[in-house]
Amino acid sequence: MRKKIIAGNWKMNLNPEEAMCILERSKMFPAESLPNTEIMFAVPALYAMMAENSLRETPHSVLVQDVSFQDDGAFTGEISVNMVKASGLQGALVAHSERREYHNENNISAGKKIKKLLDVDLVAVYCIGEKLESRKNKEEKQIVKTQLTEALSGFEVRNFDRLVIAYEPVWAIGTGEVATVEQISEMHHFIREELSKLFGAENAEKIRILYGGSMKPENALEIIQIQDVDGGLIGGASLKFDDFKSIILSSI
Ligand code: PGA
């Protein structure tokens, strides 16, 4: 059975005190309270070591929000997968739609980052999803298929537990607009089918597929119960611990 993942994506939010407060409060969920759920925090890089120190004795994971596909060298402002690993963090988000929109991230660069992360046994949360215009033109499946095949073809995955897909329709991110149960269900099923074409059905069954886009306490339970939804990537609602806590509780 696939364990659920509830991952907070803090983006460029929270001051250090607010961040610490959320991390400390998340300790109310010890391992035995969450037999089937993993909690992850994708934090600003500057807070990653603080978060790792705070959560070291807990089962919760700390991710960075982006990583370089270069090994090391003159790449000002970048972080390598080896730095992430050596700092005791568990992985990274890859190709969040805001990285695609503002930082020229594409499926090819995303694929290189995913390979690097998986090669050193870190978690890669690969973010995909269509824009509103593509949905209106009924092109959403083609877009998602291309995002999957361009990034994930051409290398072997050893541990499918560590490859996580986050389906985030761009029109639902930070807008308050949530995809319908039918839209989510159809797309997650489609993604699982495409993953089976890439990796075989047995391996595709091991990959967690998260939903993201205006997930909040009021809709979390309904979304998490959809078949092929293995948890959520949560932006706005991860910034208030009480909201994040309710979403975690919906996954149990
Ligand atoms: P949101 O963001 O929950 O605020 O819509 C989700 C995300 O961008 O990962």
Image (cartoon, grey):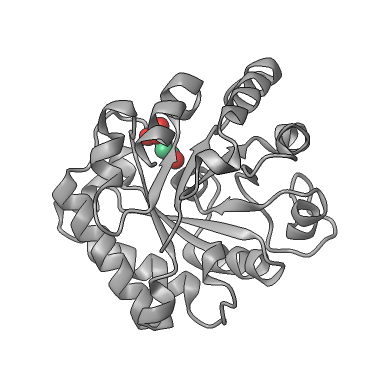
Which quadrant does ligand 1 occupy?
top left
Question: Residue 105's spot in the image, x, y percent?
Answer: 53, 55
- Left/right placement of residue 2 relative to residue 83 reads left
Above or below, comparing residue 232 to residue 144 in the picture? above
Q: Nearer the viewer, residue 193 or 69?
A: 193
How many numbered marks, from 0 up? 0
Q: Nearer the viewer, residue 152 or 186?
A: 186
- Left/right placement of residue 23 relative to residue 188 reads right
- Left/right placement of residue 198 relative to residue 229 reads right
Question: Residue 156's spot in the image, x, y percent?
Answer: 57, 82
For residue 111, say whether it is visible. Answer: yes
Q: Residue at x 26, y 47 (%)?
A: 225
Question: Residue 8's spot in the image, x, y percent?
Answer: 51, 36
Quarter of the picture containing the N terminus is bottom left
Q: Residue at x 39, y 48 (%)?
A: 231
Above or below, comparing residue 224 to residue 229 in the picture? above
Residue occupying the far front of the picture: 32
Quarter of the picture containing the C terminus is top left
Q: Nearer the viewer, residue 27 or 188?
A: 27
Residue occupying the far right of the picture: 73
Q: Residue at x 72, y 32 (%)?
A: 47
Question: Residue 120's spot in the image, x, y percent?
Answer: 72, 67
